Amino acid sequence: MGNSPPLENLYYSREHAWIQIETDKTVKIGITRYAVDLLKDIVQIQTKAVGTKVDKMTPIGIVESVKAISEIIAPITGIITAVNNGVISQPWLINYDPYGDGWIALLEPSNLKEEIKTLITAREYERLIENRDKR
């Protein structure tokens, strides 16, 4: 675990989710290191089913840790095209590698060009969490 910085090639939501653009028809979604560290040891991840349409700012699934249960809020609108079965069967993966093996789902975005404008860069996300930590 640890305090790894947000990755530059990702886009972030203020709700601690990230997206990586795989193609113009596919984005990968996960939760940030900051979210993982707040939750502590993650013991279960559940997502909505493949084929489900999710709207931006609505739950795409839940993360359960020894400390709390938290919703995973979709950073963009789209249809779930795949879930990471590795992280479903071995949720501890997200504790160690939230930006790699710990990704949660693939989404076919409905309006990526517009919705990406509402997300923030790694640098902006870093400032956001620094300001929260100062409170």
Image (cartoon, grey):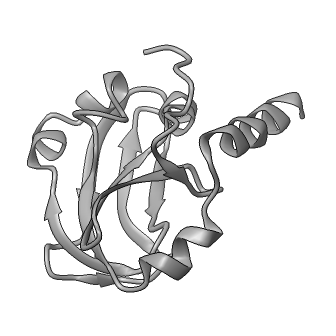
* Left or right, residue 50 beside residue 100: left
Q: Is residue 65 left or right of residue 43?
A: right
- At x 56%, y 17%, the residue is 3
The correct choice, above or below, for 10 with respect to 40 in the image is below
Residue 4 x %, y % = 52, 20
What residue is shown at x 72% (from left), y 45% (from top)? 124
Coordinates of residue 35 in the picture (x, y in percent):
53, 39
Q: Position of residue 23 (x, y in %)?
A: 25, 63
Residue projecting furthest to the right: 135
* Above or below 109: residue 87: above
- Residue 100, by quadrant, is top left
Q: In the drawing, does residue 85 fall left or right of residue 96?
A: left
Q: Which quadrant does the N terminus fall into?
A: top left
Looking at the picture, tell me which residue is in the foreground, 134 or 101: 101
Residue in the foreground of this view, choosing between 66 and 85: 85
The residue sitting at 80% across, 38% down in the picture is 132
**Looking at the picture, does residue 38 appear above or below residue 69?**
above
Q: Quadrant of the C terminus?
A: top right
The image quarter in which residue 65 lies: top left
Q: Nearer the viewer, residue 132 or 100?
A: 100
Q: In the rendered image, which quarter is residue 87 located in?
A: top left
